[in-house]
Image: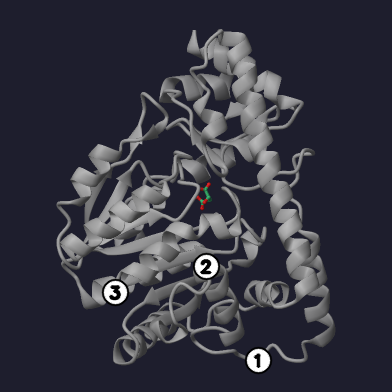
């Protein structure tokens, strides 16, 4: 059986992680995979997470199963975090999943079940796993223009023109904030335009919310998602606790469907539960419980917000420092957009050949499409990265 298996194309991001780990050079710089790094290069455990784990350790007296949808207290905490009071609770179906990827997968599984002809509209570019999962499930996929390479901003006219061709029941996949890989985010006017397109076409927004709190703040980053949820009859959300709680390996995610109250919501809950049962029965609980403990305790919540703010501010400072260093070296503001982008990533306009040269010659690791994780920058490595970029751009 196995000799006939073809080798799947490697995921560029994960492939790069392996190359970085195997590189013996002491001064190598990892700007590849999307993990937050403190100035010393480590990915720290947040103090609020440690404190919540301690409480769980002290109080938890069983590891018995929770339920196919996960813990109701986790759902409530995440619904508040993502949706605020944008929609009444009886319109929201939710199900815990292993990470945000698990939520993307379970939602697309559900869509395949109920609307096998739906087309999934994915931005050009997007996180590569969006297309990979849609393709794996045999869902039809369309691309909408998104990034304007010339300005480092969004090609609004292109995006809205493409999305206007969506059909009723299609899914428009949107990044709630901190667009991965570009770093260029929609404005509130853009979200209003997207709501209008969905109303006109009957398409349903599907929001991937993997970086809430990394852009402008927890509430600000959820504004577009909340606007769509409040103004449209249906909306799907895949959210992650990997980044904003630093719980990468604990796999914290939630699949959310905003529906009409009553039978539609009940149907969405039972579909999501059935999807979980068939995939892995019970979603992981430990990380979800940590999130619940933090979000439901005033002091821990405040501590977490402080730590999250610190991460966001340090990423913004890294962006500005790199843009400044490149301005000094190149004598132009060509990379000024880096400081305006949001979140961990920027698509910095480096070609695949230049990205390979950065890696091989200078030990600076960015994804071949030019995506850079700005959380990997430090005061020490910014001058090295800027010089290397200037050298490969010449
Ligand atoms: C990334 O985009 O680097 C992260 O979301 C990690 C991943 O799973 O690709």
Q: Quadrant of residue 386?
A: top right
Q: Is residue 246 left or right of residue 125?
A: right
Helix, strand or loop status at disc 1: loop
The tag earlier along the polypeptide, 2 or 3, is: 2
Residue 249: where, in percent of width, then height?
63, 61
User: Is 110 drawn above or below residue 391 in the view shown?
Assistant: below
- Who's the residue at 68% across and 28% down the image? 28
The tag earlier along the polypeptide, 1 or 2, is: 1
- The label nearer to you, 1 versus 2, is 2
- Who's the residue at 29% across and 59% down the image? 195
- Who's the residue at 69% across and 88% down the image? 63
Q: CA distance from mark 2 to mark 3?
A: 17 Å
- The crowding category of the residue bearing disc 2, from other C-alpha atoms within 10 Å (few below 14, some 14 to 19, many at least 20), is many
Q: Considering the image in quadrants, where does the N terminus appear?
A: bottom left
- The crowding category of the residue bearing disc 3, from other C-alpha atoms within 10 Å (few below 14, some 14 to 19, many at least 20), is some
Residue 233: mark in rendering: 3
Q: Quadrant of residue 287?
A: bottom right
**Residue to which mark 1 is pinned:** 64
Look at the numbered discs 1 and 2 and tell me whether their residues touch, using CB distance below 8 Å: no
Helix, strand or loop status at disc 3: loop
Residue 138: mark in rendering: none
- Who's the residue at 63% across and 14% down the image? 387
Helix, strand or loop status at disc 2: helix
Q: Is residue 4 visible?
A: no
Q: Is residue 266 left or right of residue 164?
A: right
């Amino acid at each position: 059986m196995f000799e006939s298996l073809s080798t799947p194309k490697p995921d560029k991001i994960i492939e790069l992680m392996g190359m970085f780990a195997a590189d013996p050079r002491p001064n190598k710089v990892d700007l590849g995979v999307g993990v937050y790094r403190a100035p010393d290069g480590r990915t720290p455990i947040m103090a609020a997470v440690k404190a919540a784990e301690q409480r769980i350790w002290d109080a938890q007296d069983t590891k018995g199963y929770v339920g196919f949808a996960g813990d109701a207290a986790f759902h409530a905490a995440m619904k508040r975090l993502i949706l605020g009071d944008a929609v009444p609770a009886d319109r929201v179906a939710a199900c815990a999943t292993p990470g945000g990827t698990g939520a993307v997968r379970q939602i697309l599984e559900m869509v395949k079940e109920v609307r096998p002809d739906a087309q999934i509209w994915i931005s050009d570019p997007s996180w590569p796993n969006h297309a990979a999962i849609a393709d794996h499930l045999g869902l039809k996929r369309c691309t909408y223009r998104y990034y304007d390479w010339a300005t480092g901003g969004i090609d609004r006219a292109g995006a809205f023109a493409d999305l206007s061709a969506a059909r009723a029941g299609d899914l428009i996949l949107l990044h709630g904030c901190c667009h991965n890989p570009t770093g260029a985010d929609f404005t509130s006017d853009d979200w209003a335009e997207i709501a209008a397109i969905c109303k006109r076409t009957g398409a349903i927004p599907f929001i991937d919310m993997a970086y809430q709190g990394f852009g402008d703040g927890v509430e600000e980053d959820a504004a577009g998602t909340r606007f769509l949820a409040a103004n449209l009859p249906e909306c799907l959300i895949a959210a992650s606790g990997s980044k904003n709680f630093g719980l990468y390996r604990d796999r914290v995610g939630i699949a959310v469907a905003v529906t009409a109250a009553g039978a539609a919501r009940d149907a969405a809950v039972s579909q999501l539960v059935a999807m979980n049962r068939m995939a892995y029965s019970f979603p992981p609980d430990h990380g979800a419980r940590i999130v619940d403990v933090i979000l439901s305790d005033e002091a821990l919540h405040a501590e977490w917000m402080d730590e999250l703010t610190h991460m966001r501010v340090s990423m913004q400072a890294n962006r500005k420092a790199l843009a400044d260093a490149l301005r000094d070296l190149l004598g132009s503001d060509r990379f000024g957009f880096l400081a305006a982008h949001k979140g961990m990533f920027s698509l910095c306009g480096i070609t695949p050949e230049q990205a390979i040269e950065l890696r091989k010659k200078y030990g600076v690791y960015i994804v071949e499409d030019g995506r850079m994780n700005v959380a990997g920058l430090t005061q020490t490595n910014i001058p090295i990265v800027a010089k290397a970029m200037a050298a490969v751009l010449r």
